[in-house]
Amino acid sequence: MHPIGMVRVPHFEFVCRTMHIEPTVSRFRVFRQMHCSQGFYSFVQRASVKKILLQPPKSFHDWKQKFFFIKVGVIPMRITFRGKEDVPTETI
Protein backbone atom coordinates (compact mmCIF):
# COMPACT_ATOMS: atom_id res chain seq x y z
CA MET A 1 0.00 0.00 0.00
CA HIS A 2 1.37 3.40 -0.96
CA PRO A 3 1.80 5.71 2.09
CA ILE A 4 -0.34 8.47 0.55
CA GLY A 5 -3.14 5.96 0.04
CA MET A 6 -2.91 4.87 3.67
CA VAL A 7 -3.28 8.46 4.88
CA ARG A 8 -6.71 8.62 3.26
CA VAL A 9 -8.12 5.96 5.60
CA PRO A 10 -7.54 7.76 8.95
CA HIS A 11 -8.50 11.06 7.30
CA PHE A 12 -11.86 9.54 6.33
CA GLU A 13 -12.28 8.15 9.85
CA PHE A 14 -11.49 11.54 11.43
CA VAL A 15 -13.99 13.36 9.18
CA CYS A 16 -16.72 10.80 9.93
CA ARG A 17 -16.14 10.90 13.69
CA THR A 18 -16.15 14.72 13.81
CA MET A 19 -19.53 14.60 12.07
CA HIS A 20 -20.76 11.87 14.48
CA ILE A 21 -21.05 9.34 11.64
CA GLU A 22 -19.80 5.78 12.05
CA PRO A 23 -16.93 5.20 9.57
CA THR A 24 -17.56 2.00 7.64
CA VAL A 25 -15.96 0.31 4.66
CA SER A 26 -19.13 0.74 2.61
CA ARG A 27 -19.15 4.50 3.30
CA PHE A 28 -15.46 4.74 2.45
CA ARG A 29 -16.13 2.98 -0.86
CA VAL A 30 -18.69 5.65 -1.79
CA PHE A 31 -15.82 8.16 -2.05
CA ARG A 32 -12.74 6.04 -2.83
CA GLN A 33 -11.78 2.99 -4.84
CA MET A 34 -8.69 0.77 -4.85
CA HIS A 35 -6.21 1.55 -7.62
CA CYS A 36 -2.89 -0.04 -8.62
CA SER A 37 -0.20 1.92 -10.43
CA GLN A 38 3.35 0.68 -11.03
CA GLY A 39 2.94 -2.04 -8.40
CA PHE A 40 1.68 0.31 -5.66
CA TYR A 41 -1.87 0.15 -4.36
CA SER A 42 -3.66 3.29 -3.30
CA PHE A 43 -7.16 4.70 -2.87
CA VAL A 44 -8.24 7.16 -5.53
CA GLN A 45 -11.32 9.34 -5.69
CA ARG A 46 -14.26 7.86 -7.55
CA ALA A 47 -15.01 9.66 -10.82
CA SER A 48 -18.68 10.18 -9.91
CA VAL A 49 -17.87 12.05 -6.67
CA LYS A 50 -17.91 15.84 -6.93
CA LYS A 51 -14.53 17.40 -6.19
CA ILE A 52 -14.33 20.10 -3.53
CA LEU A 53 -11.00 21.61 -4.60
CA LEU A 54 -10.92 21.88 -8.39
CA GLN A 55 -7.47 23.47 -8.71
CA PRO A 56 -5.15 22.69 -5.80
CA PRO A 57 -2.53 25.37 -5.04
CA LYS A 58 0.88 24.79 -6.59
CA SER A 59 2.83 26.47 -3.80
CA PHE A 60 2.45 28.45 -0.58
CA HIS A 61 4.93 31.31 -0.92
CA ASP A 62 3.44 33.47 1.84
CA TRP A 63 2.63 30.65 4.24
CA LYS A 64 3.92 32.54 7.30
CA GLN A 65 1.20 35.19 6.93
CA LYS A 66 -1.47 32.44 6.71
CA PHE A 67 -0.18 30.24 9.56
CA PHE A 68 -2.40 29.82 12.62
CA PHE A 69 -2.83 27.61 15.69
CA ILE A 70 -5.86 25.47 16.49
CA LYS A 71 -6.72 25.13 20.17
CA VAL A 72 -7.24 21.59 21.42
CA GLY A 73 -10.69 22.53 22.75
CA VAL A 74 -11.93 23.23 19.21
CA ILE A 75 -11.55 19.60 18.12
CA PRO A 76 -14.67 17.75 19.34
CA MET A 77 -12.94 14.41 19.91
CA ARG A 78 -9.83 12.89 21.42
CA ILE A 79 -7.14 12.41 18.79
CA THR A 80 -5.20 9.14 19.01
CA PHE A 81 -2.32 7.54 17.14
CA ARG A 82 -3.71 4.42 15.46
CA GLY A 83 -6.39 4.15 18.11
CA LYS A 84 -4.05 3.37 21.01
CA GLU A 85 -2.35 6.35 22.60
CA ASP A 86 -3.46 9.95 23.00
CA VAL A 87 -1.79 12.76 21.11
CA PRO A 88 0.10 14.81 23.72
CA THR A 89 -1.23 18.32 24.15
CA GLU A 90 1.23 21.17 24.33
CA THR A 91 0.90 24.36 26.30
CA ILE A 92 2.01 27.45 24.44
Image (cartoon, rainbow, N blue to C red):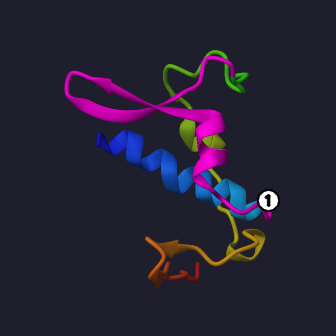
* Image location (x, y in percent) of residue 17: 70, 64
Asked which quadrant contains residue 39, the reply is top left
Tell me what residue is drawn at x 58 percent, y 21 percent.
56
To which residue does mark 1 refer?
Answer: 19
Magenta residues? 20-48
* SS for dot 1: loop
* Image location (x, y in percent) of residue 74: 77, 69
Q: Is residue 56 left or right of residue 15?
A: left
**Which residue is at the far left?**
39
- Whether 9 is drawn above or below 53: the answer is below
* Image location (x, y in percent) of residue 59: 49, 24
Asked which quadrant contains residue 54, the reply is top right
* Image location (x, y in percent) of residue 83: 48, 76
Tell me what residue is drawn at x 31 percent, y 26 percent.
36
Q: Is residue 50 left or right of residue 36?
A: right
Q: Is residue 52 magenta?
A: no
User: Are there few (<14), some (14-19), or many (20+) residues within 10 Å of tag 1?
Assistant: few
Tell me what residue is drawn at x 63 percent, y 35 percent.
31
Tell me what residue is drawn at x 56 percent, y 34 percent.
32
- The answer to which of 29 and 80 lies nearer the viewer is 29
Q: Amino acid at mark 1?
A: Met
Q: Is residue 37 magenta?
A: yes
